[in-house]
Image: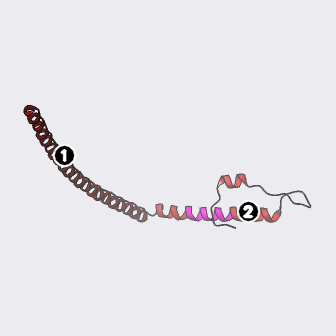
Amino acid sequence: MTDRTLTADDVRAKVFTTGRLREGYDLAEVDVFLNEVAASLRRLHQENAHLKGLVADPKTATLLIVNAREQAETIISEAQDRARALEEETRERLRRATDILAEAHTAGVRELDRWRTGLEDQLAQIKDAVATS
């Protein structure tokens, strides 16, 4: 026998083997299944009674609602704190990325200026060489 709660589909789908020496189902197998059904029903009835007791007692119901609200508020507050932290982290990453991009741009402009100057010097040398020849 198991402690799991049987479903209506479990009951509907249950297939018993037939007896070998006589017609009908194996009685031991049927008994085991009936015990599982009875245990499942017992658990469901106990749980149902427990839940009805919680709801029937206004103090308990109020406490459950208050606790649920407090938990919800805590979860929301933690989520908002996390969202603020993620937003700040994202802003900081964006700032760093912008700084890196600006530095790369400045370095690229310097490199282009260096190349331009070098090419202009070479062009001037070529012009001088052509003019003197």
Q: Mark 1 points at which residue?
A: 108
| Residue beneath the point at 13% across and 36% down | 126
Position of 54 relative to 92 (above/below):
below
Amino acid type at circle 2 is: Leu
Asked whether, in this view, residue 130 is left or right of residue 32, the answer is left
Residue ranking furthest to the front: 133
Residue 18's spot in the image, x, y percent? 85, 57
Position of 103 relative to 34 (above/below):
above
| Magenta span includes 20 | no
Asked whether, in this view, residue 1 is left or right of residue 21, the answer is left
Position of 131 relative to 23 (above/below):
above
What are the residue bounds of the magenta stretch? 38-48
Residue closest to the eye, 122 or 108:
122
Residue closest to the eye, 61 or 12:
12
**To which quarter of the image does residue 80 belong?**
bottom left
Residue closest to the eye, 30 or 91:
91
Amino acid type at circle 1 is: Gly
Asked whether, in this view, residue 80 is left or right of residue 9, the answer is left
Residue 22's spot in the image, x, y percent? 91, 59
**Mark closer to the chain start, 2 or 1:** 2
Q: In which quarter of the image is the C terminus?
A: top left
- Tell me if mark 1 has few (under 14), some (14-19) or many (20+) residues whose alpha carbon lies within 10 angstroms of its own: few
Q: Name the residue under label 2.
A: 34
| Residue beneath the point at 83% across and 58% down | 25
- Main SS of the magenta part reads helix
| Residue beneath the point at 17% across and 46% down | 111
